[in-house]
Image (cartoon, rainbow, N blue to C red):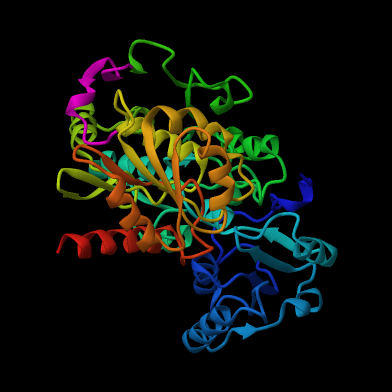
Amino acid sequence: MDHHLFARDDWVGDVEIAMKPDRIVIVGVGVTGESCIHFWYGRAPVFVTDTRLPKDASVHNRVNELRAKYPEVRFISPAQVAEIAGSDSFVYMSPGIPMHDEMFDVILATGARLTSDIELFMEQVDGAVIGITGTNGKSTTTDLTAKMLQPLGFKAGGNIGVPVLDLLSEEAPGFVLELSSFQLERMRPPQLTCATVLNIAEDHLDHHRTFAEYAATKRRIYERCELAVFNNNDPRTAPGTKKPGIAINGSVSWCVRQHEIVIDGHQIPTSELQLLGSINHYNIVAAAALAHASGVAMSHVIEIAQNYQGLPHRLQTVARIDNVHYVNDSKATNVAATLAAIEAFADEKPNIVLLAGGEGKDADFASLNEALHDHVKTAVLFGKDAQKIAVVADAVTQVAQVDSLEQAVLRAREAAKPGDVILLSPACASFDMFANFEHRGDSFTSIVQDMAA
């Protein structure tokens, strides 16, 4: 990765007294883009565009919303970036734009400073900042860590919920940030109090060109952290250099076992936890380690660990109808997440009707083979890459391909017997048929609830 993609070291301190850019260029009109507009509005001239212009009508609608809200902002076409940006400009790119997009070459040629909302946030805060990344479980672990740290007044944001720049209005002694690979790849490694990589599995290969590049991007979170939390059983999650830290599964004090977790020597049976599955049990221990390192009382950490029920769209029970368990795991947008979901509900005999499919992001679905054979009685497939999953699934289980999520639920109901689980865990992104994974999960929930009425 080119070193000049990262911000210079010469802009520090309060933005009101530090060196100011002569103009701000923001590429992307999503949540992150608006938070950058909001921060810089009135501080410097702001120019905004989106690489999806002029083709995407929804982006035009979004631009009109922002134009009404921020009348002094100048909205430009992508082609105008080269003439607007210059050596005294700061450019903020949407995290969703891949580094190999031609827009990066355009910006670098202008000599502008390519930076990010996370870097700007880090330059403005004085308190503790905890960073959490990983292929799966980031949002759950971020939310859980923040709840464990509530007595200390910590706030959560980043890739989950509140954009980081919006957190600057919060009076808080510390922050818990969810950081995606998209965010980490285009910034100097952040100066974090604690950091963790929860897990690394194949994902976003349509964005990162190789798995090695993706994994290395995740581990950048450790480069300037004071304390690292990682899985001793998975070297891919470990820092590249020796750092102070907590190695989960590296001692009897912090570990995940078959029927219990151990937090700072305190044993908690998994039967006392609300979250299902070994991946979630690891995430609980990781969150507890981050909270412990921040100085919160262990009694509070244990109470939260035992009672935390998770976030929507993540192994979420939607209904039990005729003794069939309907589960919304729409956030499972990659193969590893779906494997974890199947493991959470697996029985001695196949008991799962799996609903899967969508935008596969160039994933290899072959690793689903064993889990489908052992635990899935029927796979009901939908969406753009249903056929790619069918090639794998057809050899090991019954397969049905349908045209919509509603048809998938109806077909799953026909296949399920009392005691079975109908599991929406798509192993794919949602963008081929839905606005996002929340839209997909809400649609599933609505279909099931209508069916139960």
**Residue 127 coordinates in the image, percent (x, y):** 42, 45
Relative vertical location of residue 105 with respect to residue 353 in this rendering, above or below: below
Quadrant of residue 176 within the rendered picture: top left
Q: Name the residue nearer the viewer: 438 or 302.
A: 438
Residue beneath the point at 15% across and 43% down: 323
Dividing the image into 4 quarters, which one contains the N terminus? top right
Relative vertical location of residue 403 with respect to residue 397 in this rendering, above or below: below
The reply to whether residue 440 is in sight is yes
The reply to whether residue 286 is in sight is no
Residue lying furthest top in this view?
252
Residue beneath the point at 30% across and 23% down: 348
Residue beneath the point at 82% across and 67% down: 110
Q: Name the residue nearer the viewer: 155 or 105.
A: 105
**Residue 197 coordinates in the image, percent (x, y):** 51, 33
**Residue 155 coordinates in the image, percent (x, y):** 34, 51
**Residue 199 coordinates in the image, percent (x, y):** 50, 32
Q: Name the residue nearer the viewer: 323 or 35.
A: 323
Dividing the image into 4 quarters, which one contains the C terminus? bottom left
Quadrant of residue 47 within the rendered picture: bottom right
In the picture provided, is 65 more to the left or to the right than 259? Answer: right
Tell me if residue 108 is in the magenta stretch: no
All told, the count of numbered labels is: 0
Q: Name the residue nearer the viewer: 422 or 432.
A: 422
Tell me if residue 272 is in the magenta stretch: yes
Q: Which residues are magenta?
A: 257-276
Quadrant of residue 392 within the rendered picture: top right
